[in-house]
């Protein structure tokens, strides 16, 4: 039994491992681990109290994948329900003929299944950070009035912070039966354009698991992972016979070929069916965590760096 996670998964990995030791599935472990992060008000990149979009609204994305069946479920742009990973799992397990629900549809589904809803998803602290960002971007020291009838494109360009596009939580688990599951949850970019969807709820982009080969989950600039199908690429390279290190490195190198004005950081964690695991990042010093069943607690290890030259229009 094994769990690997992004470093911010530390708050949930003990509970996830406990579930595995008690006979729970890899899917259970992934959901339990991620829910702990989604409820943590100190993590401003996932779930409750995450950084909102440019209008000050919190929109959540999540996905989960079962490596045994290759079934998956996902939600995007969901408001008012903190445990996006649990709603994503229900999309799969309620046997809808769909993989991904978004916006009002995801929220309606969450209400129908009785998912836990919170009236307030942001603290005043984070609302204050949002207001300050808008005021600083206005150049006048005042918070501009942004509404549905005011163009937001230029405001998003001004306010979007390339240092705050990488926040997401990843969990990948192998249970006692050898089944693999992977999950991803995020509140997305800080100050994003309303309706923006990154790689986290996109199966194949930010999340992929297959018992036969392994699994991968991503954090970073999701638009890049969408364009390169990064998570699926790692698993496909494993299927082609590459080692885990070769597969993860090649998926990172693929991102160097992307054109465009917005190229930022990318991170991934991955494992193969034998339980070997690895982390990669385009930034030096990034880490991930792992825990095996015989370990009393998790260990934090450094990711291998694969440089991706950054380009950020207007910065």
Image (cartoon, grey):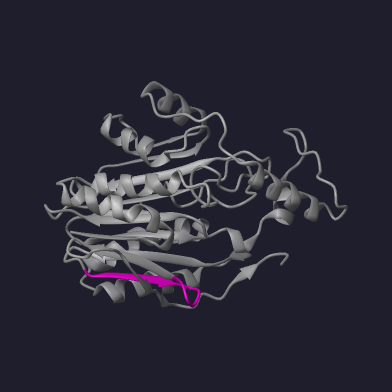
> In the rendered view, does 308 fall on the left or right side of 202?
right
Q: Position of residue 243 (x, y in %)?
A: 24, 75
> In the rendered view, does 310 fall on the left or right side of 116?
right
Check if residue 76 falls in the magenta segment: no
Residue that appears at 51% across and 28% down: 104
Q: Residue furthest front?
A: 296
Q: Position of residue 278 (x, y in %)?
A: 31, 71
Location of residue 244 (image quadrant): bottom left
Q: Position of residue 315 (x, y in %)?
A: 71, 67
> Which residues make up the magenta segment?
276-286
Residue that appears at 36% across and 52% down: 12
Residue that appears at 29% across and 56% down: 172
Q: Nearer the viewer, residue 167 or 292?
A: 292
Q: Position of residue 115 (x, y in %)?
A: 39, 28
Residue that appears at 88% across and 52% down: 140
Q: Residue furthest left?
A: 177
Q: Residue furthest right?
A: 140
Check if residue 278 falls in the magenta segment: yes
Q: Is residue 232 above or below residue 195?
A: below
- For the question of whether residue 53 can be seen, the reply is yes
């Amino acid at each position: 039994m094994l769990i690997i996670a992004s470093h911010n998964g530390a708050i949930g990995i003990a509970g996830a491992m406990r579930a595995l030791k008690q006979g729970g599935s890899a899917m259970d472990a992934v959901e339990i681990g991620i829910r702990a992060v989604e409820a943590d008000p100190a993590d401003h990149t996932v779930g409750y109290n995450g950084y909102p979009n440019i209008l000050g609204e919190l929109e959540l994305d999540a996905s989960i994948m079962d490596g045994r069946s290759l079934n998956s479920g996902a939600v995007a742009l969901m408001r008012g329900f903190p445990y996006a990973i649990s709603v994503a799992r229900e999309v799969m397990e309620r046997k809808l003929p769909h993989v991904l629900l978004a916006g009002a549809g995801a929220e309606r589904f969450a209400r129908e299944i009785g998912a836990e809803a919170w009236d307030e998803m942001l603290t005043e602290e984070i609302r204050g950070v949002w207001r300050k960002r808008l005021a600083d971007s206005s150049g006048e020291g005042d918070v501009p009035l942004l509404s549905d009838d005011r163009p937001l494109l230029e405001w998003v360009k001004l306010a979007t912070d390339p240092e705050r596009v990488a926040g997401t939580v990843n969990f990948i688990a192998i249970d006692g039966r050898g089944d693999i599951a992977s999950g991803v949850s995020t509140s997305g970019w800080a100050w994003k354009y309303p309706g923006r969807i990154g790689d986290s709820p996109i199966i194949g982009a930010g999340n992929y698991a297959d018992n036969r080969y392994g699994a991968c989950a991503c954090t970073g600039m999701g638009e890049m992972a969408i364009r390169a199908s990064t998570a699926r690429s790692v698993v496909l390279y494993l299927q082609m016979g590459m080692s885990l290190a070769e597969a993860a490195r090649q998926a990172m190198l693929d991102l160097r070929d992307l054109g465009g004005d917005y190229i930022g950081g990318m991170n991934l964690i991955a494992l193969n069916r034998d339980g070997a695991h690895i982390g990669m990042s385009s930034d030096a010093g990034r880490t991930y965590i792992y825990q095996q069943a015989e370990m009393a607690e998790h260990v934090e290890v450094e990711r291998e760096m694969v440089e991706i030259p950054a380009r950020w229009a207007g910065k």
